[in-house]
Amino acid sequence: MNICILGSTGSIGVSTLDVVRRLNSTTPGACSAHALVAGRNAGLLADQIAEFRPRVAIVETEQVLTHLIDRLSERGLPRSQWPQLEWRPESRVAAAVAPEVDTVMSAIVGVEGLQATYAAVRAGKKIGLANKEVLVASGSLVMTAAREQGVELIPVDSEHNGAHQCLRGNRRSEVLRLILTASGGPFRQTPAGEFPTITPQQALNHPTWKMGRRITIDSATLMNKGFEVIEACWLFGLSPDEVDVVVHPSSSVHAMVEYCDGSVVAQISTTDMKMPIQYALTYPDRLEAPVPRMDWSKPRVMEFYPPEPEKFPLLGMAYEAQRAGGSATCTLNAADEVAVESFLEGRISFPGIWEVVAETLDRVPSRTAASVEEILEIDRESRRVARKVVLERGNGPVVGAVANVATGNVVG
C-alpha cells in the first residue's frame, strides 16, 4: 500500500504514521508513505522524512521549505536521500493523484484539504477521510465524483467510523436511522443564563477529549455534532430526518444504527484514534490493533440524554442548512470558523458564536456550486460576510482572549 498523507504533522497524520510503523513491523513493506503533505512544522516533518523516506514532501510556504531544508541538513541526511521538496498548493494535488499512490489519508484541517481530496476521488484513489469540512462544504460535488469513480470514502472520525462498522454487510433499505453520540461538551449542565459570561479558557476545557482549539469550541457549542450530521448524510445516503444525536458523556459508544425490525447495532470501543485509522487503511480487512481494550469485568454505566436545542442552537442550524441544500452548509462552516476565532480573541461572547453564524446564513444566498473553485469562492465570500457581522456588533473585547488561535485535527 502506497499512501499520501494530507496533514502528516497534525494529530491524525502522526497517528497514521504510527499505524504505518506497526503494520510494517508485523509485515515488512506492507505500507509505504509515498508523499507527506504538511503545514508549518518543519522540524516534525524532517523527523518523518528521516524515518519513513517518502518520495515527496510538501509544506505550506516557501519560507517553511527553507526551514525544512535546514532541519534536514542538521540531521545529516545525505541530499541523495532527500525526497522531492515542494511548497506550492498545486503540489498537494499532484501528490494526491500520483500514479504510485493508491490510498490518500485526508487529514488537512478545513477547506484547505478540499482540492487535493476531490482530485484524489476523481483519480479513483481509496480515501481515508478525517477532514469533515470536505463533505460539509462540498458534499454533493465530492460524493457525485465518488459514485462516478466507484470510490468509497472510509471515515476516520470515531462516530462515522463506528457507523460504517454498524452498517457493514447490511442493506441500506433495512436502516431506519443512524444515531450519533455526543459527549455534551463542558457546558452540558451549565444553565443557559450563564452562557454570556463563559470565557475561552472555560470553553477549551473539554471533559473527555484533547483536541485543537476550533474543534474544542465546536464541541462546546455542539456545532461539531451538527457538522457530523451533515457528513453522515453524505457518507451514508441519509436524510437529516434519518440521523439523530444523543448525548453520551462517557463517549464509549460512538454510533448506533437502528434497523427496521427494531434491532439496534452499536459500535463500542475505547477512545484511541489508531483503531479507526487502521480500519480505514486496511478496509475491507480487519487486523489486530494495539489499542486499549474494553474491560467488561468492571461495572459500567452508559448514560444517554437528548440534546437541548434551545441551549445549543447551532445543532439545529446544521440540520436546517443540510435540508436547505446548495451551499448553505459551506457558509455554515465558514461562518462558524470566523465566529469561533472571534470568540477566542475575546471579540464576541459565547452566544455570539451562533448569533454570527445565523446572521451570516441570512445574508449569504445559497446556490448550487458546480466546481471546487466555486465552493472555495463561496467559502471566501461567507468569511467576508461573517467578519463584517463581527465588526458590526462592535462590542470590543468581551471576555479574556486566547492568543495564537489554531485549529486541530478532529478526534471525536
Image (spheres, grey):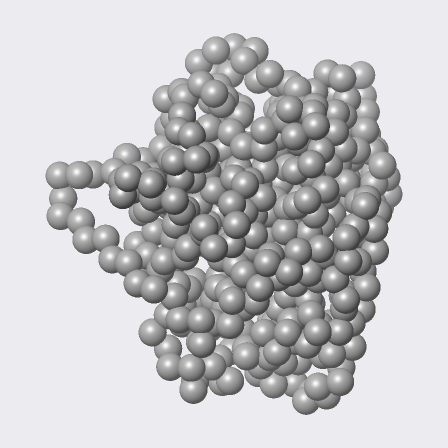
Q: Where is residue 212 shown, x and y percent of the image?
A: 55, 55
Instruction: Specify whether residue 219 is in view.
Output: yes
Residue that appears at 56% across and 11% down: 29
In the orientation shown, which residue stands out farthest toward the top?
28
Q: Horizontal and vertical percent for residue 395?
A: 68, 89
Residue plotted at (74% across, 29% down): 122
Classify residue 241 as left or right of residue 148: left
Q: Is residue 49 visible?
A: no
Q: Residue at x 65, y 38 (%)?
A: 143
User: Which is nearer the eye, 211 or 179?
Assistant: 179
Tell me residue 11's x, y (percent): 55, 43
Q: Is residue 386 above or below residue 139?
A: below
Q: Quadrant of residue 118?
A: top right
Q: Nearer the viewer, residue 105 or 29?
A: 105
Front residue (pair 363, 343):
363
Name the residue located 40 percent from the left edge and 25 percent from the top edge. Answer: 169
| Residue farthest to the bottom, as pictured | 395
Number of numbered tags placed on the structure image: 0
Spot occupied by residue 157 in the image (x, y as percentages of width and height): 50, 43
